Amino acid sequence: MRRLECSAPGGQVEYVDAAVPGLRQCVGISGAKSFALRKRVAGKCRKLPPRVLLGAATARGPCAQSCRSSFDFSLVVCERCRIPCARLCHHPVEGPRHFSQLDGARGMAATVVLVAHSGQAWIGTRLLHGFGQMGVAFFFVLSGFLMAWLYAGQPFTRSHLMRYAARRAARVLPLYYAIVLASFFASCLLFSCFVLVPTMPLWTFTFADSGSLATHLLLITGQQTLWTIPVEVQFYLLFPILWHETQAKRPFRAIAATAVAGALLALSILLYTDDPRFMPLWMHFFLFGIVVALLLRRHPEWHTRFRGHNALGWAAIVFFLASVPGLREHLGLRFLPNFIDPLTVGSTALLFLACLFQVGPLRVLATPIPAWFGRISYGLYLLHFPVLMTLAATSLPRIVALPLFFVVTIGLAALSERFFERPLRRRIAALVR
C-alpha cells in the first residue's frame, strides 16, 4: 500500500500498485471537492468518472463499492474484470473525535454550579444569584455540540440508534436513579409506607409523596438540581429526529423548524408559569451547540484559526462573569430569566466557543487536572447539593464548612465515577455491541 498526499481539503488518496504488473497511477483534482481518478492498466488508460463529491463515489466495474463518509479513498484494481474500482473508506478526517478541552470545560461548568450554591449558602450574598443556572446553560450547549459531533456523521440505522440510546442512558440514568430512589426511601418510614419521617435526613432530596417520585422516575421534571436531568434526557429523545435530517442533507431546515416549535412551546409555558424547569425554555442552548458542531464539520480549519487571539479568551471570561444576574441586580441593572436574558445567552455561547477553540487562558482546560474534573463532573453536579444541605445545617464555621464542602463533594464524585458510574456505563453499553 502506497500513500499519495493530495491538495483537496482534508483528503488523502491511498492506492495499490501490486495488483497488476506494470500498473502506473496518476491522480488529478477536478474542482474543490471532486476527484478525477485515473489509472493505467496494461498500457490502456481508463478514467473513473469524476463524480466523487462529498462522499458519493462512482466507479466502473462489478466490484465498485461506495459509502458516504469523508474524503478518504482506497483505489484497487479488480482481479476479475481488470477495471479500476474505487472504495470510499470510513475514516473521518474532519477533525478530532475527542476534544480534551471540552472535558475541562465540563469540569469548569460543574465548578461554576458548586461555587454559586456554596456562595449563596455560606456567604449569603445575592451576587451569585443565577450563576449556577449559567453553568447549567453551558452544560446544555456542550451537550448539543457533542451529540451532533459524535453522531451526525454516523449512519442513521437501527443498530447505531440502539447504541446511541444505550450510551446516553448509561451516562445519565444510573447515578440519577440511585440518588432519587435513595432519597425517596430515606424519606419514608420503615421503607414501606408513604409517611414522611418527622426529622428528614439532610443528605437526601425531599419527596413528599409517590407522585413526586413518579415525576422524577418518568423524567418529567425534578426538584432542586435534579431538574436538569429530565431536560437533558428529553433533548436526547429529540436529537434522533435532527440526526435523521442531517443524514438526509437538510439539517439546518430541521434545526430552524425545531427552534420555531420550541419557541412556541416556551411561549405557551410562560403564559401559565415562570417555572424554568422545562426543556423548551432551554432548547436554543442545545440547538446552538448542534449548529456549531455541524459548521465545524464543514470547516475543520476553524480548529486552529483563533488560538493566537488571547484577548478573545479573556474577553469571554470577563463577559461571562459580568453577565451574572446577581451582580447586575446589585448594580441596579435590569435582567431577565437566564434562559431568555440576552447577556446570559450571549456570554454563555461566547465562552463555549472560546473553550472549544482554546483561546487564550482557556487552553488550560486541555490539561490533565481540568480534564479529570470533567470526568467526575456528573457526580459533582448531582452529589453536591445533599452535601451542601447537610453541612449548612451544622454549626461549623464558614471557614471550615466551605473547604470541607468541596473536599467531600470531590471525593464522593471521584468514588462514584470510579466504582459506580464507569462500571455500569461499560456494562450497559456492552449490551448493544
Image (cartoon, rainbow, N blue to C red):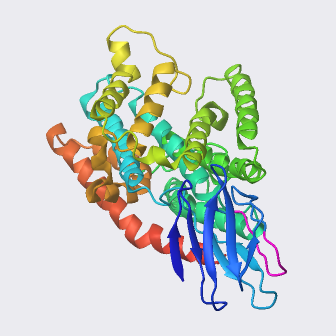
Residue ranking furthest to the right: 62
Residue found at x 67% / y 54%: 30
Identify the image quadrant of the N terminus. bottom right
Main SS category, magenta section: loop
Residue found at x 73% / y 71%: 159
Would residue 402 be found to the left or right of residue 374 on screen?
Answer: left
For this rendering, which residue is in front, 392 or 349? 349
Residue found at x 50% / y 45%: 142
Would residue 159 be found to the left or right of residue 425 on screen?
Answer: right
Up-down: is 99 above or below 118? Answer: below
* Horizontal and vertical percent position of residue 139: 48, 43
Residue found at x 75% / y 37%: 253
* Horizontal and vertical percent position of residue 424: 52, 72
Q: Is residue 102 magenta?
A: no
Would residue 297 be found to the left or right of residue 234 on screen?
Answer: left
Residue ranking furthest to the top: 332
For this rendering, which residue is in front, 93 or 149? 93
* Horizontal and vertical percent position of residue 390: 33, 47
Q: Is residue 347 visible?
A: yes
For this rendering, which residue is in front, 10 or 150? 10
Up-down: is 259 above or below 21? Answer: above
Residue ranking furthest to the front: 43
* Horizontal and vertical percent position of residue 254: 75, 40
Q: Quadrant of residue 26?
A: bottom right
Up-down: is 389 above or below 429? Answer: above
Identify the image quadrant of the C terminus. bottom right
For this rendering, which residue is in front, 295 or 124? 295
Residue bounds of the magenta highlight = 59-68
Q: Quadrant of residue 411?
A: bottom left
Up-down: is 216 above or below 72? Answer: above
